[in-house]
Protein backbone atom coordinates (compact mmCIF):
# COMPACT_ATOMS: atom_id res chain seq x y z
CA UNK A 1 0.00 0.00 0.00
CA UNK A 2 1.31 3.44 -0.97
CA UNK A 3 1.60 6.19 1.66
CA UNK A 4 0.94 9.33 -0.37
CA UNK A 5 2.15 12.47 1.37
CA UNK A 6 2.55 14.64 -1.74
CA UNK A 7 -0.55 16.72 -1.02
CA UNK A 8 -3.96 16.66 0.64
CA UNK A 9 -5.39 16.93 -2.88
CA UNK A 10 -4.89 13.17 -3.32
CA UNK A 11 -7.70 12.31 -0.90
CA UNK A 12 -10.44 10.07 -2.26
CA UNK A 13 -14.17 10.20 -1.49
CA UNK A 14 -15.24 7.89 1.32
CA UNK A 15 -17.99 5.34 0.87
CA UNK A 16 -20.38 7.60 2.79
CA UNK A 17 -19.50 10.56 0.57
CA UNK A 18 -20.01 8.48 -2.58
CA UNK A 19 -23.43 7.46 -1.29
CA UNK A 20 -24.65 11.02 -0.84
CA UNK A 21 -23.30 11.85 -4.29
CA UNK A 22 -25.26 8.96 -5.80
CA UNK A 23 -28.46 10.07 -4.05
CA UNK A 24 -28.11 13.81 -4.70
CA UNK A 25 -31.03 15.79 -6.06
CA UNK A 26 -30.02 17.61 -9.22
CA UNK A 27 -31.28 20.28 -11.60
CA UNK A 28 -29.85 22.77 -14.06
CA UNK A 29 -27.51 24.99 -12.08
CA UNK A 30 -27.15 27.56 -14.87
CA UNK A 31 -30.89 28.16 -14.42
CA UNK A 32 -30.31 28.20 -10.66
CA UNK A 33 -32.40 25.05 -10.33
CA UNK A 34 -29.99 22.54 -8.82
CA UNK A 35 -31.24 22.15 -5.23
CA UNK A 36 -28.02 20.57 -3.95
CA UNK A 37 -25.81 23.30 -5.41
CA UNK A 38 -28.15 25.91 -3.94
CA UNK A 39 -27.98 24.22 -0.55
CA UNK A 40 -24.18 24.09 -0.66
CA UNK A 41 -23.91 27.77 -1.58
CA UNK A 42 -26.40 28.79 1.11
CA UNK A 43 -24.61 26.66 3.71
CA UNK A 44 -21.23 28.16 2.81
CA UNK A 45 -22.54 31.75 2.90
CA UNK A 46 -24.05 31.19 6.36
CA UNK A 47 -20.93 29.44 7.63
CA UNK A 48 -18.77 32.41 6.63
CA UNK A 49 -21.39 35.05 7.55
CA UNK A 50 -21.32 36.42 4.00
CA UNK A 51 -24.28 37.43 1.84
CA UNK A 52 -23.73 34.88 -0.90
CA UNK A 53 -21.52 32.07 -2.21
CA UNK A 54 -20.66 30.54 -5.57
CA UNK A 55 -19.62 26.97 -6.37
CA UNK A 56 -16.61 26.88 -8.72
CA UNK A 57 -14.53 24.07 -10.14
CA UNK A 58 -11.18 24.74 -8.43
CA UNK A 59 -9.21 27.01 -6.16
CA UNK A 60 -7.36 28.53 -9.08
CA UNK A 61 -10.64 29.30 -10.83
CA UNK A 62 -12.01 30.80 -7.62
CA UNK A 63 -8.99 33.04 -7.07
CA UNK A 64 -8.99 34.12 -10.71
CA UNK A 65 -12.69 34.98 -10.60
CA UNK A 66 -12.14 36.94 -7.38
CA UNK A 67 -9.44 38.99 -9.09
CA UNK A 68 -11.53 39.49 -12.26
CA UNK A 69 -14.53 40.61 -10.20
CA UNK A 70 -12.61 43.22 -8.18
CA UNK A 71 -10.17 44.72 -10.69
CA UNK A 72 -9.90 46.07 -14.20
CA UNK A 73 -7.19 45.38 -16.80
CA UNK A 74 -4.14 47.50 -16.04
CA UNK A 75 -4.69 47.44 -12.27
CA UNK A 76 -2.14 46.12 -9.80
CA UNK A 77 -2.73 43.37 -7.24
CA UNK A 78 -0.49 43.12 -4.18
CA UNK A 79 0.42 39.56 -3.14
CA UNK A 80 2.90 37.96 -0.77
CA UNK A 81 5.93 36.88 -2.81
CA UNK A 82 5.57 33.14 -2.13
CA UNK A 83 1.81 32.88 -2.45
CA UNK A 84 -0.04 30.29 -4.54
CA UNK A 85 -1.56 32.95 -6.82
CA UNK A 86 1.92 34.12 -7.82
CA UNK A 87 3.63 30.73 -8.07
CA UNK A 88 1.13 28.07 -9.05
CA UNK A 89 -1.81 29.47 -11.00
CA UNK A 90 -0.33 29.67 -14.49
CA UNK A 91 -0.13 33.48 -14.54
CA UNK A 92 -3.95 33.52 -14.73
CA UNK A 93 -4.10 36.98 -13.17
CA UNK A 94 -2.02 38.39 -16.03
CA UNK A 95 -3.34 36.20 -18.85
CA UNK A 96 -7.03 36.46 -18.02
CA UNK A 97 -7.53 39.50 -15.79
CA UNK A 98 -4.84 41.67 -17.39
CA UNK A 99 -3.53 42.77 -14.01
CA UNK A 100 0.00 43.13 -12.73
CA UNK A 101 0.97 41.20 -9.60
CA UNK A 102 3.23 43.01 -7.14
CA UNK A 103 5.02 40.35 -5.03
CA UNK A 104 5.70 41.65 -1.52
CA UNK A 105 8.22 39.94 0.81
CA UNK A 106 6.55 38.49 3.90
CA UNK A 107 7.54 36.63 7.05
CA UNK A 108 6.47 32.97 6.73
CA UNK A 109 3.82 34.14 4.31
CA UNK A 110 2.46 36.85 6.61
CA UNK A 111 2.34 40.53 5.71
CA UNK A 112 2.23 43.57 7.98
CA UNK A 113 0.42 46.89 7.43
CA UNK A 114 3.62 48.75 6.53
CA UNK A 115 4.33 46.14 3.83
CA UNK A 116 1.12 47.29 2.15
CA UNK A 117 1.12 51.00 2.94
CA UNK A 118 4.63 51.45 1.56
CA UNK A 119 3.75 49.75 -1.74
CA UNK A 120 0.32 51.09 -2.66
CA UNK A 121 0.85 53.22 -5.76
CA UNK A 122 0.36 56.96 -5.65
CA UNK A 123 -1.78 58.44 -8.39
CA UNK A 124 0.65 58.87 -11.26
CA UNK A 125 0.37 58.27 -14.98
CA UNK A 126 3.47 56.07 -14.80
CA UNK A 127 1.99 53.63 -12.26
CA UNK A 128 -0.73 51.00 -12.38
CA UNK A 129 -3.53 51.71 -9.88
CA UNK A 130 -3.40 49.45 -6.80
CA UNK A 131 -6.83 47.85 -6.42
CA UNK A 132 -6.59 44.54 -4.57
CA UNK A 133 -4.61 42.73 -1.89
CA UNK A 134 -4.58 38.92 -1.86
CA UNK A 135 -3.50 37.02 1.24
CA UNK A 136 -3.17 33.24 1.72
CA UNK A 137 -4.32 31.36 4.84
CA UNK A 138 -2.88 28.79 5.48
CA UNK A 139 0.25 29.57 3.49
CA UNK A 140 1.44 26.68 1.36
CA UNK A 141 5.08 27.51 0.56
CA UNK A 142 5.65 28.74 4.11
CA UNK A 143 4.74 25.27 5.36
CA UNK A 144 1.08 25.59 6.26
CA UNK A 145 1.48 28.66 8.48
CA UNK A 146 -1.60 30.45 9.81
CA UNK A 147 -2.51 34.10 9.99
CA UNK A 148 -3.71 35.23 13.41
CA UNK A 149 -6.98 37.15 13.45
CA UNK A 150 -5.11 40.26 14.56
CA UNK A 151 -2.74 40.02 11.62
CA UNK A 152 -5.64 39.73 9.18
CA UNK A 153 -7.43 42.67 10.81
CA UNK A 154 -4.36 44.90 10.70
CA UNK A 155 -3.32 44.23 7.12
CA UNK A 156 -6.91 44.42 5.84
CA UNK A 157 -7.47 47.74 7.61
CA UNK A 158 -4.31 49.09 5.99
CA UNK A 159 -5.42 47.96 2.53
CA UNK A 160 -8.95 49.28 2.99
CA UNK A 161 -7.61 52.65 4.16
CA UNK A 162 -6.00 53.01 0.74
CA UNK A 163 -9.12 51.96 -1.15
CA UNK A 164 -8.04 48.38 -1.89
CA UNK A 165 -10.30 45.35 -1.66
CA UNK A 166 -8.93 42.29 0.17
CA UNK A 167 -9.28 38.71 -1.07
CA UNK A 168 -8.28 35.72 1.04
CA UNK A 169 -7.06 32.61 -0.72
CA UNK A 170 -8.36 30.33 1.99
CA UNK A 171 -7.80 27.06 0.17
CA UNK A 172 -6.97 25.56 3.59
CA UNK A 173 -8.78 28.09 5.80
CA UNK A 174 -10.41 25.31 7.82
CA UNK A 175 -6.95 24.06 8.77
CA UNK A 176 -6.19 27.59 9.97
CA UNK A 177 -9.45 27.73 11.92
CA UNK A 178 -8.77 24.40 13.65
CA UNK A 179 -5.18 25.37 14.48
CA UNK A 180 -5.88 28.89 15.77
CA UNK A 181 -9.37 28.55 17.19
CA UNK A 182 -10.51 31.47 15.02
CA UNK A 183 -13.77 30.76 13.20
CA UNK A 184 -13.89 31.03 9.43
CA UNK A 185 -16.60 33.67 9.89
CA UNK A 186 -14.28 35.81 12.02
CA UNK A 187 -11.55 35.56 9.40
CA UNK A 188 -14.04 36.33 6.61
CA UNK A 189 -15.41 39.38 8.43
CA UNK A 190 -12.13 41.21 7.85
CA UNK A 191 -11.89 40.64 4.09
CA UNK A 192 -14.08 41.26 1.06
CA UNK A 193 -13.95 37.79 -0.45
CA UNK A 194 -12.73 34.31 0.43
CA UNK A 195 -12.03 31.26 -1.72
CA UNK A 196 -11.86 27.89 0.00
CA UNK A 197 -11.29 24.38 -1.34
CA UNK A 198 -13.44 21.33 -0.78
CA UNK A 199 -10.99 18.99 -2.49
CA UNK A 200 -7.99 19.20 -0.15
CA UNK A 201 -8.19 18.16 3.49
CA UNK A 202 -11.99 18.12 3.41
CA UNK A 203 -11.85 15.13 1.09
CA UNK A 204 -14.27 16.06 -1.71
CA UNK A 205 -13.28 15.04 -5.26
CA UNK A 206 -13.74 18.46 -6.83
CA UNK A 207 -14.71 22.04 -6.18
CA UNK A 208 -14.17 25.27 -4.30
CA UNK A 209 -16.43 28.07 -3.13
CA UNK A 210 -16.25 31.83 -3.28
CA UNK A 211 -18.00 33.82 -0.57
CA UNK A 212 -18.61 37.56 -0.39
CA UNK A 213 -21.22 40.23 -0.87
CA UNK A 214 -24.24 39.65 -3.10
CA UNK A 215 -22.88 42.18 -5.60
CA UNK A 216 -19.48 40.45 -5.69
CA UNK A 217 -21.05 37.03 -6.24
CA UNK A 218 -23.28 38.43 -9.00
CA UNK A 219 -20.14 39.62 -10.84
CA UNK A 220 -18.42 36.33 -10.08
CA UNK A 221 -21.25 34.37 -11.73
CA UNK A 222 -20.66 36.24 -14.98
CA UNK A 223 -16.93 35.54 -14.84
CA UNK A 224 -17.50 31.87 -14.03
CA UNK A 225 -19.66 31.62 -17.15
CA UNK A 226 -17.08 33.41 -19.28
CA UNK A 227 -14.37 31.04 -18.06
CA UNK A 228 -16.42 27.96 -18.90
CA UNK A 229 -16.97 27.10 -15.26
CA UNK A 230 -20.78 27.10 -15.23
CA UNK A 231 -22.19 23.59 -14.81
CA UNK A 232 -25.52 21.86 -15.33
CA UNK A 233 -26.51 18.97 -13.02
CA UNK A 234 -23.67 19.74 -10.61
CA UNK A 235 -25.53 18.54 -7.53
CA UNK A 236 -23.69 15.24 -7.74
CA UNK A 237 -20.42 16.95 -6.88
CA UNK A 238 -21.98 19.64 -4.70
CA UNK A 239 -23.30 16.84 -2.48
CA UNK A 240 -19.73 15.77 -1.80
CA UNK A 241 -18.92 19.33 -0.77
CA UNK A 242 -21.85 19.47 1.62
CA UNK A 243 -20.84 16.16 3.16
CA UNK A 244 -17.27 17.43 3.54
CA UNK A 245 -18.31 20.64 5.29
CA UNK A 246 -20.68 18.83 7.65
CA UNK A 247 -18.43 15.87 8.49
CA UNK A 248 -14.76 16.49 7.72
CA UNK A 249 -13.87 19.84 9.28
CA UNK A 250 -13.27 18.91 12.92
CA UNK A 251 -11.29 15.81 11.95
CA UNK A 252 -8.59 18.07 10.43
CA UNK A 253 -7.18 18.13 13.95
CA UNK A 254 -6.19 14.50 13.39
CA UNK A 255 -4.14 15.50 10.34
CA UNK A 256 -2.39 18.19 12.37
CA UNK A 257 -1.56 15.67 15.11
CA UNK A 258 -0.06 13.27 12.57
CA UNK A 259 2.03 16.08 11.09
CA UNK A 260 3.34 16.88 14.59
CA UNK A 261 4.10 13.19 15.10
CA UNK A 262 6.06 13.09 11.85
CA UNK A 263 7.93 16.32 12.62
CA UNK A 264 8.85 15.13 16.13
CA UNK A 265 10.05 11.79 14.80
CA UNK A 266 12.25 13.47 12.20
CA UNK A 267 13.70 15.81 14.83
CA UNK A 268 14.46 12.86 17.09
CA UNK A 269 16.59 11.43 14.28
CA UNK A 270 18.66 14.62 14.34
CA UNK A 271 17.15 16.00 11.14
CA UNK A 272 16.56 19.72 10.63
CA UNK A 273 12.87 19.88 11.57
CA UNK A 274 11.28 22.04 14.25
CA UNK A 275 7.94 20.54 15.37
CA UNK A 276 6.91 23.89 16.88
CA UNK A 277 6.83 25.30 13.35
CA UNK A 278 4.46 22.58 12.16
CA UNK A 279 1.24 24.53 12.60
CA UNK A 280 -1.16 22.48 10.49
CA UNK A 281 -0.80 19.48 8.17
CA UNK A 282 2.55 20.17 6.47
CA UNK A 283 6.06 19.16 7.46
CA UNK A 284 9.07 20.70 5.73
CA UNK A 285 12.34 18.77 5.74
CA UNK A 286 15.45 20.57 4.49
CA UNK A 287 17.75 17.80 3.30
CA UNK A 288 20.93 17.65 1.28
CA UNK A 289 20.20 15.17 -1.45
CA UNK A 290 16.44 15.71 -1.26
CA UNK A 291 15.84 14.52 -4.82
CA UNK A 292 17.70 11.28 -4.19
CA UNK A 293 15.80 10.68 -0.94
CA UNK A 294 12.47 11.15 -2.73
CA UNK A 295 13.48 8.45 -5.23
CA UNK A 296 14.42 6.07 -2.42
CA UNK A 297 11.19 6.76 -0.56
CA UNK A 298 9.20 6.00 -3.70
CA UNK A 299 10.95 2.63 -3.92
CA UNK A 300 9.48 1.96 -0.48
CA UNK A 301 5.97 3.07 -1.56
CA UNK A 302 6.20 6.47 0.10
CA UNK A 303 5.40 9.52 -2.01
CA UNK A 304 6.36 13.09 -1.14
CA UNK A 305 7.39 16.19 -3.07
CA UNK A 306 9.58 19.27 -3.03
CA UNK A 307 8.29 22.55 -1.64
CA UNK A 308 11.43 24.32 -2.80
CA UNK A 309 14.76 22.99 -4.06
CA UNK A 310 16.30 20.98 -1.23
CA UNK A 311 13.15 21.02 0.94
CA UNK A 312 10.89 17.97 1.06
CA UNK A 313 7.22 18.59 1.85
CA UNK A 314 5.08 15.97 3.58
CA UNK A 315 1.32 16.63 3.77
CA UNK A 316 -0.98 14.63 6.06
CA UNK A 317 -4.65 14.08 5.24
CA UNK A 318 -7.64 11.83 5.90
CA UNK A 319 -6.17 8.91 3.93
CA UNK A 320 -3.05 8.80 6.13
CA UNK A 321 -3.02 6.90 9.43
CA UNK A 322 -0.76 6.85 12.49
CA UNK A 323 0.50 3.47 11.30
CA UNK A 324 1.48 5.08 7.99
CA UNK A 325 3.48 7.75 9.79
CA UNK A 326 5.26 5.07 11.84
CA UNK A 327 6.21 3.32 8.60
CA UNK A 328 7.46 6.56 7.06
CA UNK A 329 9.63 7.31 10.09
CA UNK A 330 11.05 3.78 10.20
CA UNK A 331 11.87 3.94 6.50
CA UNK A 332 13.53 7.36 6.66
CA UNK A 333 15.61 6.24 9.62
CA UNK A 334 16.90 3.25 7.65
CA UNK A 335 17.65 5.38 4.60
CA UNK A 336 19.41 8.36 6.15
CA UNK A 337 21.10 7.08 9.32
Image (cartoon, rainbow, N blue to C red):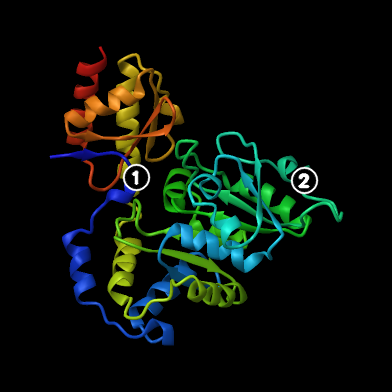
Secondary structure at numbered mark 1: helix
Residue at the image point whose x is 65% and y is 65% from the top: 70
Q: Which residue is mark 1?
A: 253
Q: Quadrant of residue 239?
A: bottom left
Residue at the image point whose x is 33% and y is 64% from the top: 246
Q: Which residue is mark 2?
A: 117
Residue 334 in the image: state x and y as whole percent: 20, 17
Q: Residue furthest front?
A: 95
Mark 1 surroundings: few (<14), some (14-19) or many (≥20) residues within 10 A: some
- In this view, 201 is above or below 289: below
Residue 226 in the image: state x and y as whole percent: 51, 74
Left or right: 262, with 75 as reference point? left
Mark 1 or 2: the one toward you: 2
Sequence-wise first label, 1 or 2 = 2
Q: Nearer the viewer, residue 15 or 56?
A: 56
Left or right: 191, with 245 as reference point? right
Q: Nearer the viewer, residue 132 or 14?
A: 132
Q: Residue furthest right?
A: 124
Amino acid sequence: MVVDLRSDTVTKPSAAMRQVMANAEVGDDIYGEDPTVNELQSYAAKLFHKEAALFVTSGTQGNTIAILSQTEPGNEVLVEENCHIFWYEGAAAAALAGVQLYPVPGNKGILKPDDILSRVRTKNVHFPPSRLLCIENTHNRAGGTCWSLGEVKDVSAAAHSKGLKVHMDGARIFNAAIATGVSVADYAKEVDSVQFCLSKGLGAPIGSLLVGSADFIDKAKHWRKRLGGAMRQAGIIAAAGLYALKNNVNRLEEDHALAKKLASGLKNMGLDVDPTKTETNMVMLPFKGADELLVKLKEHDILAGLSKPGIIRFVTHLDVSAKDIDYVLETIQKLVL
